[in-house]
Image (cartoon, helix red, strand yellow):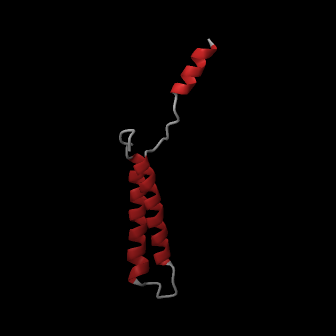
Amino acid sequence: MAQKKSTITESKSAQFVFGKNNYRLMITSIVVVVLGFILMIGETDIYDFRKIVLAPTVVLIGFAIGFFAILKKPGNSNE
């Protein structure tokens, strides 16, 4: 009886929720969002193109990448 339990626990392997590509996309999205917030920093004019158009667009693109990384199904187990 004890031997059956050990074979059952050995056959179960730890599986992560996301695949390797999902984690790469999530790290990429975090970097893009941080880049967008860095673009918002500065002593220049508050109505500068970089602050009111470019930086928010970059942040939204980063959030979209993160959303995609969460919803993407992991591929086969040999990624």
Residue at the outermost top position: 1
Residue at the outermost bottom position: 44
Q: Name the quadrant containing residue 9.
A: top right
Residue 16 x/y as whole percent: 49, 41
Horizontal arrangement in the rendering, residue 75 relative to residue 15 (left or right): left
Residue 70 x/y as whole percent: 43, 49
Q: Which of 33 and 11 is in front in this view?
A: 11
Residue at the outermost left position: 75
Against 15, residue 51 (above or below) is: below
Image point 42% across, 74% down: which residue?
55
Against 50, residue 77 (above or below) is: above
Q: Nearer the viewer, residue 76 or 78?
A: 78
Figure label count: 0
Residue at the outermost right position: 2
Residue 30 x/y as whole percent: 48, 62
Against 71, residue 26 (above or below) is: below
Image point 51% across, 26% down: which residue?
11
Residue 25 x/y as whole percent: 41, 55
Image point 42% across, 77% down: which residue?
52
Against 22, residue 31 (above or below) is: below
Image point 46% across, 77% down: which residue?
39
